[in-house]
Amino acid sequence: MYCKICRSCPTQARGNSLVHGVTGDKVRLKTIKEHVATALHKSAAEALQAREDPGGGGGVVGVAFDRMDAAVQEKLVKLFNIAYLIAKEEQPFTLFPKLMTLHKTNGLDLGSTYHNNVACNTFVEVIASCFIEDLKEELQAARFFSVMSDSSVDHSVKDQEMIYCTYLVDGKPVNRLIQIVTLDHAHSQGILDAILKGPKVVGVQEEDLKLRLVGFGCDGASVMLGLNNGVAARLKHLCPSLVAIWCVAHRLELTALDCLKVLPQLKELNKLRVIHKHYTVSSKASRELEEISKAMEVSILRPGNTEGINIIKICLLYFIFN
């Protein structure tokens, strides 16, 4: 008979018989206690606990951190803060060693280890896992939640689906980015698969979506809001009580664009758009505009952008004063 934890026989330590008699009906308690006290069993038990709970206080990592010198802990906290800043500002991890050199120059003691981009990547992954755990707890406590989704293309020209979650914390709405999922296909089923896959990272399974998903926000593209085969329609098959909402800001921008086509006074904005592009993309044109301004001794403002939110502002001002 072998121990399931250390895979060794309890009778090897002391040479005592494990059972009474020849039938094996009764186990010797003394032999079990002596085996549990051996170094081999203790080491195996600690390794098993560390595998099951690598971040827990009883695991090897937790014990090592508790035994760590206070000065070393303080240095690690500073390294984590710097790594968080790099991730927050969307800077490359290769900036991490340069910041280490800068802080050393300014007299900050950061030790002599973990001063490379690989360590920065590790720190960011640990920070991300902590955020994910906090988000899991908040979502588990939320009675209902909604999902917002939008697509974009990254530098490698791959479709990415950004998935956000909205829920209430102390009666106030909170928006959190859940996951960015690479799309296998950009059709409605591919986007739906991404939406179902993303929340699993924060512990939200398909059954949770059926029970607690009440809203879905997206843009007005037909692939998202198509009546029969759009993503919202497919989600409603999964969650019959789902309410799909077309992004208000997107609808407002489309309305403003329609106003430009209908109202003759606003059609002139298209000319400003061309002028803005001319002076934005050409340094030569900008330099010539500045020279003209100096020669005429007048202040010339560079034409502003008339796209996006600026169109909405212009349209609102037009309707207010007319």
Image: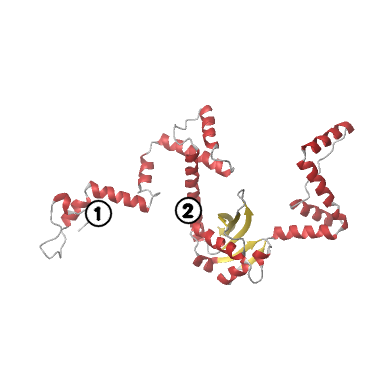
**Residue furthest to the left:** 21
- Give residue 63's position: percent from left, percent from top: 35, 44
**Residues at discs 2 and 1 in contact (Cβ within 8 Å):** no
The answer to which of 193 and 36 lies nearer the viewer is 193
Which label belongs to residue 186?
none
The answer to which of 283 and 241 lies nearer the viewer is 283
Q: Amino acid at mark 1?
A: Arg
Q: Residues within 10 Å of mark 2 (few under 14, many from 20)?
A: some
Q: Is residue 144 left or right of residue 313?
A: left
The answer to which of 226 and 125 lies nearer the viewer is 226
Answer with the quarter of the image where residue 76 lies. Answer: top left
Q: Residues within 10 Å of mark 1 (few under 14, many from 20)?
A: few
Q: Quadrant of the N terminus?
A: bottom left
Residue under label 1, please give it.
7
- Give residue 166's position: percent from left, percent from top: 58, 59
Residue under label 2, please give it.
133
Classify mark 2: helix, strand or loop. Answer: helix
- Give residue 121's position: percent from left, percent from top: 50, 43
Q: Nearer the viewer, mark 2 or mark 1?
A: 1
Q: Is residue 291 left or right of residue 15?
A: right
Q: How many marks?
A: 2
Q: Is residue 17 left or right of residue 174?
A: left
- Give residue 186's position: percent from left, percent from top: 61, 60
Q: Tell me which label, 2 or 1, sits earlier in the chain.
A: 1
Q: Amino acid at mark 2?
A: Glu
Q: Quadrant of the C terminus?
A: bottom right
Name which residue lies at 75% across and 59% down. Answer: 254
Q: How is the image coloured?
A: secondary structure
Between the residue at mark 2 and the residue at mark 1, the CA separation in whole angstroms equals: 34 Å
Classify mark 1: helix, strand or loop. Answer: loop
Name which residue lies at 81% across and 48% down. Answer: 274
Relative vertical location of residue 234 with respect to residue 31 in this rendering, above or below: below
